[in-house]
Amino acid sequence: MIMIMNNKYVILLFVSALVFFLGINPLQPSHAATLTLSGLDAGTHEIDFRDIGILSDFTPVISTDKQRYHPGQDGILTVTDHSANVDLNTIETVSANIGSNTVILTETGENTGIFRGPFIADGSITYSPENPSDAVRAKISITLAQPGDVTISDVNLSDGIGCPNEPVSQGVNISLSNGAELASVDSVIISYANAVLSFTNSDGQLIQTSPEFLRMHYQFDPNFQYALVAQLNIPGFNEVLDNPYLLTVKTDQDIEQIAEEDDGREPLTLGEGTYVLTSDTGCGGGGGGGISRSGLVIQALGALSLSSGSQVNAPPTMGLGQNEKRIVDGGFSFNDNPINVLQYYTPYPLVTTPVGQNNTIKLKIYEEEGLNNIAHVGLSYGLGKGETFNEGRATIEYDRTFDGVESVTTFDPNHVLGDVNVTTSDVRCGENSNAVCREFTFYHVFREPLEYNMVATNIWDSQLNSWQNYFNHGVQITGESMNPPKQYSGIFEGHIYQLTETGKNIAVDENGNTWTNDKTWTRDYIKPIAVDNNILNDQKIAAIEQLGFGYSDGQAIFGFDRMDHRFVDAKEQQKNYAQSIMNDLCPKCQNESYDKINNIFSYDLPVTSKLEQQNQMHIEDQKARQFLQEYFDTIYHKSID
């Protein structure tokens, strides 16, 4: 689709969720490039002003690294614009607009004319070249008598140079500064590969010309008229002056003959000033200059393309058209809460709905190529911050084939949705609009809550022109899940466990142990041990805790349950501790194997009556007392002595 906006020619191409506005402007006076070579030495210099070797592809070509972008997504933008390649010995830059932001594209190398740079998708892409497609391409040979600066620049000649000579491209100007003195301009070569060779004169007549009738004119001072300095076809003089392979015109060496052939003026000496290629178009009904050059605009619009080389229509919309004017009122509605849809993100006040309730979402869609051209309508629930349509937790998708076959599919791995149905009807797009929209009504219930609330839509037509919209805060589902608990089976430390989910990332096994899911399920529950209250009552527990044990931990007193995964570690620690105590008490006890130290014996005590045992114990007690008395007497007497 081609539109004219404020005299600016724009081609609109829609790519997924991003709109590309690719612009080429007609020749305007502000379009001018300048190349200054500073500090040139005295002597001869050849200066390239753009590349005369480029014979085609004069209008910019814009391409991207992806066919579709989501808002905020990174991308690479490439612009091939040979007219922006002014200095063949320098890496140059151009700029493009991404929404309200400006990005700088850098030439991929010296004299490539290909500019590339990263961008973030945030609205339309606009590229307005600073150099028109008929920008002059010249090679100049100049000799300086004194060193200094030489400046080569574009000259806009949209008003012509005087009847009957019409410029077929921009002109090129040579000027000196900073002490430079000219010895001679040896030659000026201008390419006509990008010349405009069809015109509409002041009488509205279409005039066609051909390269063989091209001329070069020179003006050394703006107060004087242009003089002819080269002509491709002067019979008998210069039939072979042009180079058909380079498509160029070079200043004649026999300047005197050409001047005489033109109007008998004195021969000219080439120097500073403006050089331009022209063609004799005739003066029509009234004077020269100001010829409408529609051929340039046609050429530019016809050649501009994406890398795919095709132009596409606008995608279906629930709100704004391609000129960002509202087409649809109330394009999105959840349970009769409509809102006007914006370009990408639409602020939508949070709506709550309970689990198990019947819900309806209505999407009102306009399609400029006809409502039957709407091929796909997708609805996605449960998106979090920064997520896109395909990352939704539950989606409903309507499709219509080219022959009218309709189908509805869902992507719902967690069984969030139930009783899904989609109907369509044709309605007015707005109360004050005669446009007709197709309204898609999605019926469904939610079977369980979702963690996130944002809603997204994804719509495309039969030519795959697509658009996505996002609604936040969105829809919040409340209540308990209607779905049975999820169950999992797995092997842990050689045992098979059946886990039943009891909450988010929490489950319980058949033994009552709880598990936590942090990428993998891990058992973390300590099974309580039944305690006899007569053995361990509240007072005893308090006394134990006073000694520094933590009964509430369960581990300090009772240890781990045998089935707990920490039991093995605790047992190993106790084993090592016992081993260290044994080594301290008996360092040599473990030097020999058990069978060599297994000389343990036992004997049976004689069987006696209880009375006999008491008598024997009394006798032994008397013996001991007597022994001690005698021993103490001996000690004390010796001390006294």
Image: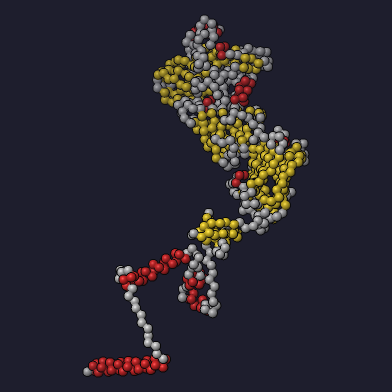
Q: Quadrant of residue 507?
A: bottom right
The residue at 55%/77% (across/down) is 533
The percent coordinates of residue 22 (x first, y second) are: 60, 31
> Where, quadrant-wise, is the C terminus in this rendering?
bottom left
> Could you tell me if residue 346 is visible in this image?
no
Q: Is residue 352 above or below residue 163?
A: below
The picture places residue 244, in percent across and down from the top left corner, at 51, 14
179 or 551, nearer to the observer? 551
* Nearer to us in this view, 267 or 48: 48
Say above or below: 587 vs 626. Answer: above
Outermost residue, top side: 236
Residue at image point 44% right, 26% down: 38
Q: Residue at x 42, y 23 (%)?
A: 40
Find residue 441 and report its image quarter: top right
Describe residue 71's horizontal placement relative to residue 116 as left or right. Answer: right
Say which of 52 and 562 sits in front: 562
